[in-house]
Structures are given as structure tokens and as C-alpha cells.
Image (spheres, rainbow, N blue to C red):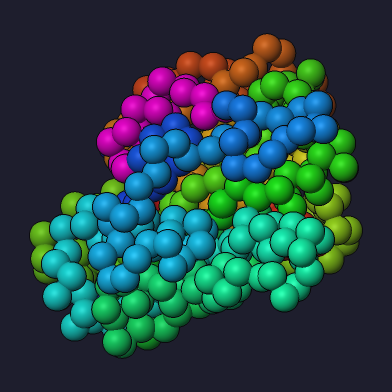
Amino acid sequence: MSDTAQRTGRQAAQRPDSARVVITGLGVFSSIGIGAKEFTEGLRAGRSGVSPITAFDVTGYDRANGCEVRDFAPQEWITRGPAAELGRASQFSVVAARMAVRDAGMDEEELRERRVQISIGTTDGESRDLDHLAASWVSDGPEAFDPGLSRRLSADRLSASVAQELRLTDAECVTLATACSAGNYAIGHGFDALRMGDADIALCGGADAMCRKSFTAFYRLGTIAPDFCRPFDVDRQGILTGEGAGVVMMETLESALARGARIYAEVLGYGLSCDAHHPVSPEQSSIERCMRSALDDAGVAPEDVDLISAHGTGTRMNDVTESRAIRGVYEGRPPRTISLKSMLGHTMGAASALAAVACSLAITHGFIPPTINHRRTDPECEIDCVPNESVDADLRVVQNNGLAFAGNNAVVVLGKY
């Protein structure tokens, strides 16, 4: 066993099993794969989720690629009422939560006897429906609003609908709208509930659907790439918007061992920071503070970390600022640092949740997903982004970064159990 493994094992073992939190179920809907098996295959292969946008009319846009979830059939998962009563983002969160419970091997009757924390992060909520209502207002006035769409708008339905679908009566339902880091915020929220004894099970993650509002906002900012997202590449030209959901089922180690559950990874700790520095421009010292806070909470040193899943948007400013922050924390010797957005696009509030799923699978199966579409690393970034092809690796500790508008940052640290 390596020195890193010994250190990490000792630190985790110092906590009682009732205060150690593990991931036992994964739910994932993405443009490169649905479910843990297909998603793993997509990550290993460096699959691209890019295709022409079909979610809305792209007439007039000279850049119109995105990363949509194809062949999404929510009615196969949603059984308590018509799936059409939920907006697409709520559908994503519900089906990913049910998939995570099923993947964890927990009977839903047993789940109903537990105290459950449900935390779902999002950027846009049901803005896709809001797009349609706005168009209706412009064309026919507010009196023409579709009442069904109006009922679907509330963002709290992303979490409440999970409890409704799974018939959970002893559950706290929270929707966190901290934009692009919301998935990590949600995982941290559930982690705290479990280690403090306030919940027995946590279903946490993020969900967002492709919408015109966000695409147009990034388009007007000049940050939509013409073809592919190329994080850390000297020729990168911006993001591609995406959609999907990632939900993890977490429980204490004590609970997982008692029921003989499969363990994907252990949640070692997390950190948050909010600097309110600028609406869209990241602030290096705040990112560094967030990463150090996460490592401190996890009880690991920088040299213990084998991989960083970066926020890695593919924009000029984000990639350089995040790379400099990483090099600052890791004293110029960062571990391999990848960006899953090269494959998935920017899935907004689902981004760091999907990354948490990917990190858990990478730990379990012993590989590092690549940063695809890569040609030449920007000298200002100075990282090994594992270009274009995955590599085998024994991963003991993985850091998952989530950076959001207005300096809402969240970093989660996962470890091999």
C-alpha cells in the first residue's frame, strides 16, 4: 500500500463508521450515456455529446451546437402521475434519484422507513418552460399562458417531486440555486446531514434542461464555442451548453456495511466560498480558499490527491484562473487535471453532480477520463489535462471542483474506500 493510501486510510478510520459517508448508488442522465454502465463506457472512450441543438429554434444563431440528452423516456421511470406534469429539469432529477436508489440496491419500501435528505442543485430550474411562456406572452399576451406550464415552473419541484415520486414522508427537500456549483453544494448539504445524524439516507445532485435563456445569455457574452469545447487548449473558444442530471445516494458507512451495499467512493469532505467578486469573472484567491477548505475538511494534504476534476469551462478567463489557483494550492505540482465539459458540455447546475458521479466511477474502475478535443495546452494553464485518451490509474483521492457565477464555489473531495 502506498504512503498516500496509508495516510488516507488512517484519517478516514479515525472517524466512527456512523460519521463516515459513502456513495452507494448512482443516477446519471447525460449526453454521453444513461446509467452508470453506459456513462462509464462514454467516459473511458472519450465520447463527445455534441450535436445540433433541437430543444429550441436556433434560426439566427451562427453557433448552435449543444449537448442534449437523446432518447430520454421519463415515463419509464416516473410512475406516480403523468411525467408531463413535470418540467424537463424536474423529470431529470426524479428519474436520476430513482435510478440511484435502484443502483444502490435499496428497496423503496425500506427507503420510506428512513429519514431522507433530498438536495438538488440547479441553475435554470424550469427555464425551458419559462421560455415557452415568454414566447406566448409576446405573441398572444399573458392571458394565453398554458396553465400546465405555469404549474411546472416552481424550482422547488426539482427536489419535492423526488419525495413525491418515491412516496417519502420523512424527508427534507431542498433545491439549491447556486448556479454551476449547485451539484457540489447539494452533495455537501447531504454529507453534513448524514455525518451530523440528521438523516439516514441522502439523495443529492443536480439537474438542468437545455433552454434558450441560458444559451442566448452565453451567446451574447461571446462565450459559445463554434464547434467543440476545448478546455485548457490554446485555441479554446468557449462553452457548449448541455443538460442532464446526476444524483448520488449517500449513507453512512455503518448503514452501508449493515446492508452489504456496494461502495463506489467515500465522501471525505467539502469546502465552500463565496467572494461576490464579479458576476461572471472568477477570483483566484477565493478558488484557492475553497480548495484548501475542502482538503482540510477531508483531512488530506495536497500531495494525497491523485486527480482533479476541474470546472474547466473552456473559456479564456476561467481556465487560466482555475489553473493558477490549482497551482497555488498544489505549489506548482498539481495532479492530473481534467475537464469533463469537453465531453458533456456545460450542464449548468448538473455539472459538478455529473462530475461527482464520474469521479466515483473513475475511483471504482481505476481510470482517468480524458479531456477531449485537445490539440495544444495553453502555456498559461500548465497542467496535464490527460488529452484525448483515458488512462488507467489507481485513484485514492479525487478532488471535484465546481465554480459558479458571483463566486459561488464548491469543492468535494472523494476517496477510495
361 lies above or below 264: above
Residue 190 in the image: state x and y as whole percent. 43, 71
Q: Main secondary structure of the magenta part?
A: helix
Residue 324 visible in rendering: no
Left or right, residue 52 beside residue 269: right
Q: Is residue 328 magenta?
A: no
Q: Foreground: 363 or 311?
A: 311
Left or right, residue 391 beside residue 164: right
Q: Residue at x 86, y 58 (%)?
A: 279
Residue 53 visible in rendering: yes
Left or right, residue 19 beside residue 406: left
Residue 33 in the image: state x and y as whole percent. 39, 35
Residue at the extreme top of the image, as rendered: 375
Q: Quadrant of residue 44?
A: top left
Instruction: Find the magenta span and give its range.
Output: 35-50
Residue 381 in the image: state x and y as whole percent. 76, 28
Q: Foreground: 170 or 142?
A: 142
395 lies above or below 29: above
Q: Residue at x 31, y 55 (%)?
A: 75
Q: Residue at x 28, y 36 (%)?
A: 37
409 lies above or below 243: below
Q: Looking at the figure, which quarter contains the N terminus?
A: top left
Q: Is residue 49 magenta?
A: yes
